[in-house]
Image (spheres, helix red, strand yellow):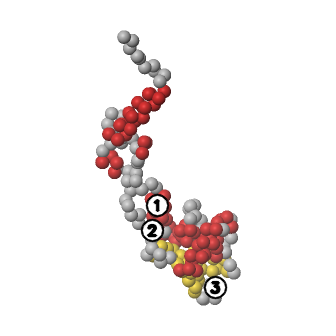
Amino acid sequence: MKKRYLTIGDFKRNAFIVAAATCMGLTSCSSNNQQDEWKTGDEVAVPDGIITELTEEGPDQWKITDERTTNPGGSMAILKYNDGRIDTLQGLALENQIKDLAANEQQYRQGGFGLGSVLWWSGMGYMAGRMMSPNPAYYANPGVMNKTAAWRQNVQTYRQQTTAPRSGRSGYFRGRSGGAGA
């Protein structure tokens, strides 16, 4: 009686064995505690809105004179003109201005102290998607810029949480958290 031995080179058999071992290893080596350790919360807190106060220093020359946080959705820009007029951008007008800022980022990034450029470098620009740190040249004094540092960090955290995967580690590369032999 001749015994049939399988050769090491039998590709289909070896692929099946590796696939079966991998599947059994990935499903049996984890527990619920390990699956939950990288998960983020289901709800991501929306960052506060911001009120930016701009003061006209000359014809089409603006400086940021105050920034403070407000409730989410309550953002506005308060414009104080040289002649004493005060105007506010909020709601649809502010939304259109923010869309313009985001669409023309290159133009506003290059400089100048016009209303668009100053808004781009304010908290409004950060909300519109500016990723760079604020430019101190656009602020009336450094204290105004520093008041909103915590707010900018909250917006950055919000951006990271909304773009991160919700379910934590999953799939073939979930692995074990305790290292080898855990």
Q: Position of residue 177 (x, y in %)?
A: 36, 42
Q: Position of residue 139 (x, y in %)?
A: 58, 71
CA gap, disc 2 to disc 1? 12 Å
**Placement of 14 over or under 36, stated as above or below:** above
User: Going by the picture, which residue comes out furthest to the front?
Assistant: 1
Please name the amino acid that badge 2 sits on.
Pro
User: Is tag 2's residue or tag 1's residue first in the polypeptide sequence?
Assistant: 2
Q: Which residue is mark 3?
A: 82
Regarding residue 85, the answer to whether it shows in the image is: yes
User: Is tag 2's residue or tag 3's residue first in the polypeptide sequence?
Assistant: 2
Please name the amino acid that badge 1 sits on.
Thr
Q: Residues within 10 Å of mark 2 (few under 14, many from 20)?
A: many
**Placement of 16 over or under 39, stated as above or below:** above
Q: Residue at x 33, y 39 (%)?
A: 29
Q: Of tags 2 and 3, which is closer to the observer?
A: 2
**Placement of 168 over or under 17, stated as above or below:** below
Q: Residue at x 48, y 64 (%)?
A: 155
Residue 162 is marked as 1
Q: Residue at x 42, y 42 (%)?
A: 172
User: Going by the picture, which residue comes out furthest to the bottom?
Assistant: 84
Q: Which residue is mark 2?
A: 47
Identify the secondary structure beneath mark 1: helix
Identify the secondary structure beneath mark 2: loop
Q: Of tags 1 and 3, which is closer to the observer?
A: 1
In-image side of 169 versus 80 (left or right): left
